[in-house]
Amino acid sequence: MEELLTPVSQTYRKPSQNNEQSTIPNPAGLVPEARSRDFFVVSSPEEAIDALRSQPSYDTLLSTFKYLKDGVQGKHLFDVRRPTSQSAQVVHILITEIVPNYWAVIRDASTGRSKGDTDALISCLRSLTGINAVLARLRALLKEAKSDSKALKNSHVGFNLTYSLELLSELLQSDHVITHIWSGIRSLDTPAQTRPMRQELFSLFTSGKITSLSAEAEDICRQTGQSNDDYWISSTKAYVEWLGRNVVTCARSSGDQEDLQLCADITARTLRLGNPDILINTLFTELLLHDAESQRKFELILGLFPALEQRKVLDIILAVLADKYLNNTDGSDVTESSPVICAASGALKAVAGHDETWKNNLVSWLTGASGAGIGENCSIRRAAVAVFSGDREAMATIVERSLCQFGDQLYIKHAPLLQQDAHAQVLLLSAGYIHRLSPIKLTILLRSGIYLNAISNRIAASQTRARFLGMVVGEALSGLVHGKETKLDFKMDEMDTEEARWYKSLVLVADSIGPLDPLKEIAVTPKSVSGARFQARPTAASASRPAKPLPQSGFIIEEIEDGEDEDPDLVPYSKPDSDAEDSDDDPTLINRNKPKAPVYIRDLIAYFRDTESYDRQKLALATAPALIRRKANYGTEVSSHAEELATQLVGLQNKFELDDFDNLRLQGMVAVVVAQPKKMAPWFAKTFFDGDYSLSQRASILITLGLSGREIAGFEISEYTPAAQFPSKTLPAKIERRYLASAPPSSRLESSASRLKPLGPNALDTLAQSLSQAFLGPLSAEAADAVTGPDALKLSSFTSRLAAEKAAGPRGDGAVARPRARAIPNTTASLLASSFFFPLTSRFQAAARSPAATRAGGVLFQPDLLALYVKTLALLLHAAGPSTLPLPQMTAELWDLLLALRNRRGGGAAGELGVARALLLGLVALLDVNERDMRGLCERHGRELVETAEWVGALFENTRGGGDGAGLGAAEENDLKMLAAGVLIRLREAVDKYQAVLMGDLIGYTRD
C-alpha cells in the first residue's frame, strides 16, 4: 500500500538560527545517529581520543579541534603540547588518520571556512610532539617508497607524502613558531622537565633533519607526479632565513636572560647549516637596525655567543656590511667623511666595541692573514679602523702589527697582492689616527728599526708593486712626522700618479662613529622589480576568437593571368623565408605575437627575467652577445646594468632545454666582461668564491674569465667589430641576403648572430691543450734531432734549411726555436694582472685559510673545479705575457699556489690525473712567460725551482705510460707523463745552467 502513496510535492528549507536548537517531535522518541553526532561536544581527553578514532564527521572533528585549541589557550587543564601519554595519542591519531583523510577537505577553499579549520588543526600540532610526529610520518613513508620503487606511482605513498609536506609547511610557516613552542616548554613544572625539552628544541630545528627529509620527500613527489610545487622547507636558504626571523621574534617578545640565551644558542648552531650570511643579515637588519631596544638585545645576544663562533660571526657581519652597504660608496675622495661609513662604524662599535674579546677579533681581522677584506672597497677598512678612533692603545697595536707585517720579507714575497694592498691601507689609516691621538708614539715608531727595515725590505723587493707600496707608505708616514725639508721623498714618477696621491691621503682620513640611520635607509630601500610576467603563448580564449573580417567593398577585383606581356628583364623576387610555425596545419597553434629582438639593455634584462616565456628566453640568449658588444662603448647602458646583467646570465637555468644553451650563455658572459673589464672581472671573481652557485655555474665563471682575458690580450682577432657599429649602419639579415647575395664572400655583411663564434664548455681545455702542444713541440723536435742528426745533415731543400736558420734567430746553432709568449701592451697586461689574475689568487688563499668566511670553501677543492681554476690562472698568466710589469708577483703567487696544491689531488684516479695535469699546465705557462729571464727566476725562486723539479720527477716516475694500454685512462696517463717529462727537462736545464746561482758563487772554488 505504501507505493500507492505518492507525494504531490516536496519542500526543503535551510535551517536558521532560530530552529537549529529546536527539536522535531518523534513518535518513537529516537534521535538519528547522524544528528546526535552533529551536536556532540568534547569535554575530556578520553572523549577526544574516542571521537578521533571512530571516523568522526566533519562537525565532530571541528568540535574536537575546538576542545584541543581551548586547552592550548589555557581554558581547561588538558594541553596537547605537554609531553603526556594522552597528548601523544591525540597527536598520533591526528597525523596517521585524520590528516590523510581530511586534509583535502580542511584545505578546501570552497567551504568558506578552510582558513579557520586549518588554523585549528595547526594549533593542535604546533609543538615538539606534533612536529616530531610529522617527521616520523615522513620517515616511514620514505622508507615505504624506497622499498617498492616500481609500484610507487600506483601506491598511496605519493599522496600521503604530499599531504605531510603541506602540513609541515603550514606548521612552520609562522615567524612565532619557536616562541610558541618555547613558551610551552617554559610552562613546565620543574627544571628537570624543561632541560630535556630545551635540548630537543635545539636538536629539532638546528640539526638539518627538517630540510633533508623534506627535500627527499619533495623529490619522490615529483617522481610520482603528485606535486610539482617547490616547498620552502626543503630549501636550506629559505629555512635558515625562517629561523632568523623566528630568533628575531623571540628576542623582541621578551628581554629575559633565558630567552636571549636561547636565541644565542639557536643562532650559533644554525650557522653550521650553511648560508650563515643570510642568518646574520636577518639579525643585523631586524634587530640592530630596528630600534634602540632591539639594538640592545642584539648586543646581548652577541655577548652570549660561544667564543669559537664569535670570530666567524664578526667576519660575516663585516662581509655583509661591505657587500650590502659600503661597496657602492665613492672612495675617490677619502678626505671627506661619508655618512654611510660613519654609520657602518657605529654598527661595528655596537657589535665589537664593548667587549675585549670582540675587540681583539676585530684587531685580528685588520692585521691578520685574512687580509682585512680582500677585494672589498676601502670603505669597510675605514669603518673598522674608525671603531678604535678613541682607543689609543688599540690603535697603537694596529699600527705596530701592521708595520711589522708590512716589512716582513716572507710576507712581501708570498702574500697575495690584494692582501698587501689592504694591509697597506690599514697601516696608513691607523697611522693617521695614532698621529692625532698621540703624535709621540708615531714619532718613536718611525725612529725604530721596524720602520727602517720595512721600508728597506720593500725597496729591495723584486716585485714592482711591493716597491710601490713601500715608497707610498714611507713618504706618507714621513710626511706626518717630519717637516717639508726633512720628510722622505723618493722623487719617482710613480709617486706623482693619482693612485699614489690617493694612498698618501689615507693618513688624513678622520671618520667618526655616527648614527645608524643611513644604514636603515639603505636596508629599507626596495629592491628592483624582478620584471613582469609576460604571456608567452596566446591564451585559449584569444586563440579560439575568430579573426575580425576585413571590410567588404562594392568592387570585385578579378585577376587576369597573361604570361605573354611579361617583361623578361624583370627578375621576380624569391619567396621569403617563412618560420616553421607558419607551416603548421593547425592555425590555432601558430603564435602571431612573437616578441621582437631587444634593442636596449633594459629590454634584454626583462627578457632574461621572464623565465616563463620560451620565446623571450631563446631570443635573449641569441641576441645578448652582439647587443652587449654593440652597446659597450655607446652610452652608459652596459656600464649601468652590467652587474644586473651578469647576475641574470650566471644564474640562468636551461628550463626549456634550449639548443646550444651553454655556449650562448657563455658568449653573453664573455661579452659583459670584455665590455667592462675593470669592473666586471673582479665582480666575477668575487661571485665565484662568495656566490651561492652550483659547480657548473662556478665552472662557467672560470671559463668566462679565461676566455675574456685572452680576448682582451688580443690572442684571437675579435670577430665582433662590425657589430660594434651603430645599429642603423647594419642592414637587416633578410635585406643582406637579398641584395648582397652576389657579392664576394669577403665583402658580405653577415648578421650578428652568424658572426658569433661558438664557445663550448671545454673551451679552456682546448686552449690548454694547444698551450701544452706548443710547449712540447720544440722538445719533440730536439729529441728527433738527437736521434737523426742535426738539420744541416738532413736531406731537405735549401728553402726549408733557410727557413729553419731564420727561425733559429741569433742563436745560430741550428736548433729549433721555441715559440715564445708574445708581448702585449703594458696597459693591457696590467689590466689582466690587477682585474683578472690577482682577485682569483688572493681570494683563493683567503678561502683556503678561512673556509667559514665563504660558501665556496668546501666546493672549491672539488677535483674538476680545482683543475679548471688552475687552468684559468695558467691561461691568464700566459695571456699577460713577459712584458707584464707585475710578472714577478704573478709568478710568485702562482708558484706558491701550485706547490700548495700538489698534495690536494683527491677525487679518485680521474680527479688526480685532472688536477696533476692542470698543475703541470700552470708550470708550463710559468716557465714559458719567464723564459727570457730564467736567471732572475732562479735567483728569486731557487727553492721553489728545486722543489718543483723533485716533485715533477717523482710524478714522472710514479705515472704509468708509454705502454700499449687501451682506454681513456691509459691515454690520459700517457699525456700526463709526456707533459711531466717536458716540464722536467726545462727545469733541469735551468738547474744545470744556473747551478752557481742556485748553489752559491763559491761552488766553483770547491773543486780546486
Image (cartoon, helix red, strand yellow):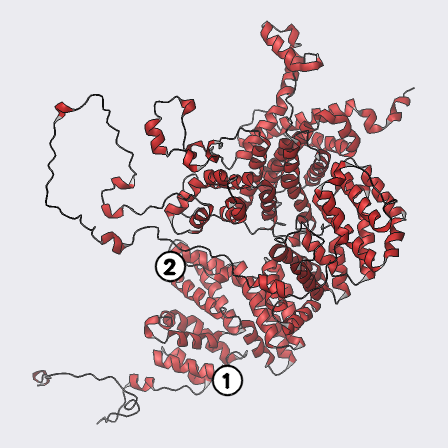
Question: Is residue 917 in view?
Answer: no
Whole-percent x and y of residue 718? 52, 31
Is 468 above or below relative to 267? above
Residue count near mark 1 (Cα–Cα under 10 Å), binned few <14, some 14–19, many ≥20: some
Q: Position of residue 385 (x, y in %)?
A: 74, 57
462 lies left or right of 925 = right
Type of amino acid under label 2: Gln
- For image coordinates 67% across by 10% down, the residue present is 790
Q: Which residue is mark 1?
A: 78
- Earlier sequence position, callout 1 versus callout 2: 1
Query: Where is 39 relative to 995, above or below?
Result: below
Q: How many marks?
A: 2
Q: Position of residue 749 (x, y in %)?
A: 41, 28
Residue with the mark numbered 2: 226
Q: Secondary structure at mark 1?
A: loop
Res 154 seen here: yes
The answer to which quarter of the image holds residue 179 is bottom right
Helix, strand or loop at mark 2: loop
Q: Can you say which quadrant of the picture contains the N terminus?
A: bottom left
Q: Are marks 1 and 2 in contact (CB under 8 Å)?
A: no
Residue projecting furthest to the right: 1008
Q: Amino acid at mark 1?
A: Phe
**What residue do we see at 18% from left, 48% from top?**
550
